[in-house]
Amino acid sequence: MSHRDPMRHAIIQMSRFPGIGQRTAQRLVYWLLRQPKVVAEEIAAGIAELHGGMTQCSVCCNVSGTDPCRICATTDRDTGIVCVVERPQDVAAIEASSAHHGRYHVLNGAISPLDGIGPDQLAIQELLARVQAAEFTEIVVATDPDVEGDATALYLAALIKPLGIRVTRLAHGISVGTEIEYADKSSVARALENRREL
């Protein structure tokens, strides 16, 4: 009767993380073995709590530990400007730039017909409901500078501009093909400051 090798199993599980290959996973496992047992237990507990402890903000569709999220709950942000992003991690990247002081809306993806993702799979109806219920002066479309991001931006502009709301797109402070979450904060800040009309 063979027993499962705990080290091999841990390496396989660690290598499931994006950007973590076998060698990095192995280094992480050896690092964990050198730590007190409580460190591994705290890391495991933190990961295990994610699914039960997180929810989707009913206002902006961001992932949050509270509903509404911290950004939607605060009163010291510009309520007239909404920055529309593809992913929750894009909110964190834009917040790190300190260039946006308005609200956010997370689409949870981008239009990608080749991947079978159409507008109905994104949080576009929730955005339109917010647009119709509030007095927004500008929608900043901060989708990635790639084919899917451009298609999503044009689709949103076609829906929102007829409502008399200014629709802008991030300028090219961010290189084409770069995901916003991986852009440095000064590039994100420049892209926000130099946004253009759609």
Image (cartoon, grey):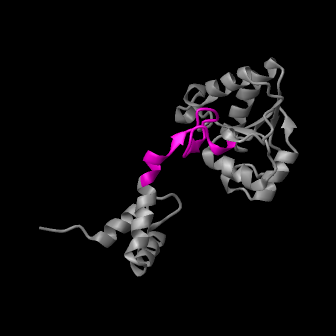
Task: Describe residue 50's horizontal placement relative to residue 132 as left or right.
Answer: left
Task: State the residue at coordinates (85%, 52%).
Answer: 190
**Magenta-drawn stretch contains 58:** yes
- In magenta stretch: residue 43: no
Q: Which residue is drawn at 59% across and 31% down?
A: 122
Query: What residue is shown at x 66% (from left), y 22% (from top)?
Result: 129
Counting from the top left corner in percent of width and height, residue 57 is at: 58, 37
Q: Determine whether 56 is above or below 19 in the image.
A: above
Does residue 137 appear left or right of residue 109 in this picture?
Answer: right
Residue 105 to residue 7: above or below: above
What segment is highlighted magenta in the picture?
Answer: 49-71
Residue 176 lies, in percent from the top left, at 74, 49
Within the image, what quadrant is residue 198 found in? top right
Please state the horizontal and vertical placement of residue 127, each as a whole percent of the image. Answer: 67, 28
Q: Residue furthest front?
A: 75
Residue appearing at x 73%, y 50% in the figure: 94
Identify the residue at the far left of this view: 1
